[in-house]
């Protein structure tokens, strides 16, 4: 399955984990530090918050990233419980 809608928010790649939880993977590309805040913290972080509010601990959110991201955005996303992976360059 490529995309699905959970609690009113579209998920790029939904995965059912072996323990029954949902892994909601979001794929984002950013062309600069200012754009990274919108892509990661507003879009992915907003969806993660919405999904946690609806499903509780039954959902895990991850972001696969490409491009340039501000380091503070990456750290803020991780602090909010979003697992971050990808090929990216961070800037301060």
Image (cartoon, rainbow, N blue to C red):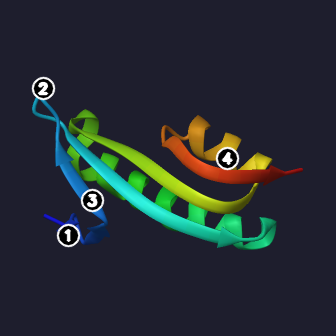
Q: Earlier in the sequence, mark 1 or mark 2?
A: 1
Q: Earlier in the sequence, mark 1 or mark 4?
A: 1
x and y percent of residue 30 in the render?
A: 65, 70
Residue 12 versus residue 64 in the image, above or below: below
Q: Earlier in the sequence, mark 4 or mark 2?
A: 2
Q: Earlier in the sequence, mark 4 or mark 3?
A: 3
Q: In this view, does 1 lie to the left or right of 33?
A: left
Q: Is residue 41 left or right of residue 75?
A: left
x and y percent of residue 71 in the render?
A: 78, 47
Label 4's element?
A: helix
Residue count near mark 2 (Cα–Cα under 10 Å), binned few <14, some 14–19, many ≥20: few
Quick check: marks 1 and 4 in contact, CB under 8 Å? no
User: What residue does disc 4 label?
Assistant: 74
Q: Which of marks 3 and 2 is nearer the N terminus?
A: 3
Image point (42%, 46%), residue name:
62
Residue 19 - label: 2
Label 1's element?
A: strand
Q: Mark 4 and mark 3: span between their CA atoms?
A: 20 Å
Image point (42%, 52%), residue name:
49
User: What residue does disc 3 label?
Assistant: 13
The nearer-to-camera label among 4 and 3 is: 3
Residue 79 versus residue 11 in the image, above or below: above
The nearer-to-camera label among 1 and 3 is: 3
User: What residue does disc 1 label?
Assistant: 5
Q: Mark 1 and mark 3: span between their CA atoms?
A: 10 Å
Q: Mark 1 and mark 2: span between their CA atoms?
A: 21 Å
Residue count near mark 3 (Cα–Cα under 10 Å), binned few <14, some 14–19, many ≥20: some
Q: Mark 4 and mark 2: span between their CA atoms?
A: 27 Å
């Amino acid at each position: 399955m490529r995309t699905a809608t959970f609690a009113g928010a579209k998920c790029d790649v939904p995965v059912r984990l072996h323990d029954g939880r949902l892994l909601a993977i979001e794929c984002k590309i950013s062309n600069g530090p200012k754009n990274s805040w919108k892509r990661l913290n507003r879009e992915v972080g907003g969806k993660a918050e919405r999904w946690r509010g609806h499903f509780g601990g039954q959902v895990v959110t991850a972001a696969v990233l490409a491009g340039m991201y501000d380091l503070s955005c990456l750290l803020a996303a991780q602090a909010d419980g979003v697992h971050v992976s990808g090929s990216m360059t961070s800037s301060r």
